[in-house]
Amino acid sequence: MKSKFSLPTQEEIVKRLKKIPEGLWRECPECHEKYYYRHAGSLEVCPKCGYGMRIGARKRIKMICDEFEEWDKALTTDPQNADPKYRQKLANGIKQTRVNESVLTGKGKIGNFAVAIAVMDSRFIMGSLGQVTGQKIAHLFQKATQERLPVIIFTASGGARMQDGIHSLMQMAKVSDEVARHSAEGLLYIAVLTDPTTGGVTASYAMQADIILAEPKTLIGFAGRRVIEQTINQKPPKDFQKAETLLKNGFLDAIVERKDLKSYLNNLLSLHAE
């Protein structure tokens, strides 16, 4: 009796593979475990190691805020005099993130508490700190000081934006000045460091908060690993720029899993409510 089943040919296998939609199976960049995309859940967290995938600013706002009113929506980098490649990068960033710059700012509500909130988006030119990014964050602190609001910033950045030259570096000082004014009024500032937080953002407002939190396994540092290795002629430990190492050495106040962030922030706001 002949079998009704037969092995597919190589050509048939290729045809079947082409019919499988892309993105069903993903690989965690942290532990390299492959998983079915639905197993990451709506919060997009690796089911094995708990690493939080990089997510957009608007999705983060939906996870954290019960209400949100965007500020400085029309504020954007004027590309008229910019290099054509830079103009294209700006256009791609706006299209991908639906935000006019690498940070989304506004007034939100977490539980019963109103907050001034900013969320950086690593998909917009790697969340780089450009002129307008700094302007939006500085304005956020100004309005928060005027309205006596606590500030929460979710950082995600590759550092200062080289296309903006010295003007990008000046944003570190400008934002730091507004952080100091906000603090002088006795108002609360919470920074939540997400993967990655590096460069000038780490060297300024990311580390100037009253309370500094991070998601698990977040990369946090100033210079890149290769630059450090070339400078000190040594190989640093594998995990020396991970959130867990920074917490152990006193640079962070807590590491909070993504599923717990909203309730954790709500508790902090209740403890510090005026």
Image (tube, helix red, strand yellow):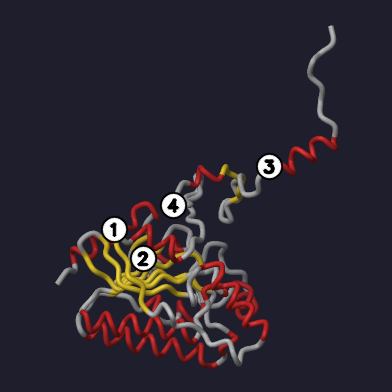
Kind of residue sitting beneath label 1: Tyr
For this orientation, the residue located farthest to the left is 274
Closer-to-camera residue (140/268) = 140
**Residue at mark 1 to residue at mark 2: CA–CA distance:** 10 Å
For this orientation, the residue located farthest to the top is 1
Kind of residue sitting beneath label 2: Leu
Kind of residue sitting beneath label 4: Leu
Kind of residue sitting beneath label 3: Ile
Tag of residue 43: 4
Look at discs 1 and 3 and give the one toward the viewer. 3
User: Image quarter for residue 24?
Assistant: top right
Closer-to-camera residue (61/127) = 61
Q: Position of residue 236 (x, y in %)?
A: 57, 69
Task: Report helix, strand or loop for mark 2.
Answer: strand
The mark that comes first in sequence, 4 or 1, is 4
Residue position marked by numbered label 2 in the rendering: 213
Task: Report helix, strand or loop for mark 3.
Answer: loop
Look at discs 4 and 1 and give the one toward the viewer. 4
Would you call the spot at circle 4 few (<14 residues within 10 Å), some (14-19), or many (20 or more)? some
**Residue at mark 4 to residue at mark 3: CA–CA distance:** 24 Å
Disc 1 + disc 2, Cβ < 8 Å: yes
Residue position marked by numbered label 3 in the rendering: 20
Task: Report helix, strand or loop for mark 4.
Answer: loop
Tag of residue 264: 1
**Residue at mark 4 to residue at mark 1: CA–CA distance:** 16 Å
**Residue at mark 3 to residue at mark 2: CA–CA distance:** 40 Å
Task: Report helix, strand or loop for mark 1.
Answer: helix
